[in-house]
Amino acid sequence: MIPNELSLPLPPAPPVGIGVAMTGCGSSVPEVCVDNDTLSQVVDTSDEWIASRTGIRQRRLASPEVSLTTIATTAAQNAIEMAGVTPMDIDLIILATSSADDLFGSAGRIQAELGARRAVAFDMTAACSGFVFGMVTAAQFIRTGTYQTVLVIGADVLSRWVDWSDRGTCVLFGDGAGAVVLQANESDRLLGFELCSDGRQHQSLNLAYKPEPKALVDGVTIAHGTYHPVTMNGQEIYRFAVQRVPEVIEKVLYRSGLTADQVDWLLLHQANQRILDAVAQRLHIPLHKVISNLAHYGNTSAASIPLALDEAVRQGKIQPGATIATAGFGAGLTWGAAIFQWGR
């Protein structure tokens, strides 16, 4: 028998071609804060070495009892509350993550924790580009009239997969979650987007499965193993980001009929302050328009854009109607950009 809450009549679908608006945002980070001085007790590094190269001063790390599902659910609840909807209003949940609690996916667990019983839920893996990819995917479901209200979550707990003896990577990453609610709207607030991938460069940044042969019976050997820690060619990723990210933003600006000086805020994946500064300089966007919370959280992968967005909105920096250029970039290699206006 179908549960009562699922047998209630569904709201009417919006007409094809309706617009998209971002109506709520939320975030959540673990309580444990590790600054650079503390990290210098783990590897041969210093606050000056880390901050001068990355802009990072501290990061949040999940303790063993804190799951990705926990922080992602809290971020989602905050976004739902700001949007003025209920969990039962959510039609779709997209979880962008590379570090799910379960290899089969964590979106369903989050759906259950929220009580969003009407929603279909699935994970999406596009690493640090995941939130932008998820937001664009959600917008297509809304624009075609399939769904009216979509929850997009970016969350990662990469501290699980970092080599804590490698100072080139362990100083970079932090754990966190951010979420937004996208809704059908009379005016389309997603002004343009572009998504890109280049698998030829996957070796520059990966978290690879490393199999070991395991003989089952004579003549039958399978691969049995686990994932090895994050590996990264920092110089290659820097060159990739400072070239590709301005290009993709310029393309989206052109398609949106906008110029860089019409952008109120530049909101990039929070990977490295040098990258943020270089992209802004190439786009001729002044640094006071660049949203950055990298110093406090480090690189939180798919969480970084919605986490920074939520802080800026709640601090009153980003006001309704503000035009935001956002871009994610990372493993895959993947990158993408979107131009949107905050609010209905």
Image: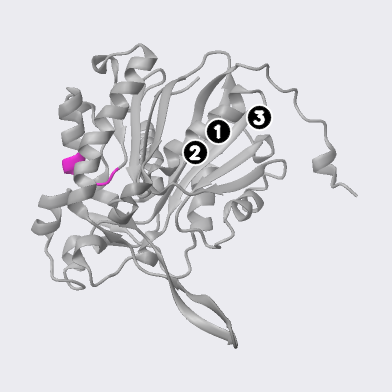
In the figure, residue 244 lies in which quadrant? top left
**Which tag, 3 or 2, sits closer to the chain's start?**
2
State yes or no: discs 1 and 2 in contact (Cβ < 8 Å).
yes
Amino acid residing under circle 1: Ala
Q: Is residue 304 left or right of residue 56?
A: right
Q: Which mark is residue 134?
A: 2
* Up-down relation of residue 138 to residue 54 (above or below): above
Q: Residue at x 44, y 46 (%)?
A: 126
C-alpha separation, residue under disc 3 versus residue under disc 2: 14 Å
Amino acid residing under circle 2: Gly
The location of residue 285, given as percent across then percent down, is 20, 23
The location of residue 143, given as percent across then percent down, is 59, 22
Q: How is the image coloured?
A: one colour
**Which tag, 3 or 1, sits closer to the chain's start?**
1
Q: Residue at x 35, y 25 (%)?
A: 324
Q: Which residue is label 1 attached to?
A: 138
Mark 2: few, some, or many residues within 10 Å (few <14, many ≥20)?
many
Residue 272 seen in the current view: no
Q: Residue at x 38, y 47 (%)?
A: 199
Q: Secondary structure at mark 2?
A: helix
Residue 273: in magenta span: yes
Q: Which residue is label 3 attached to?
A: 147
Residue lying furthest bottom in this view? 218
Magenta span: 270-275
C-alpha separation, residue under disc 3 versus residue under disc 1: 9 Å
Q: Secondary structure at mark 1?
A: helix
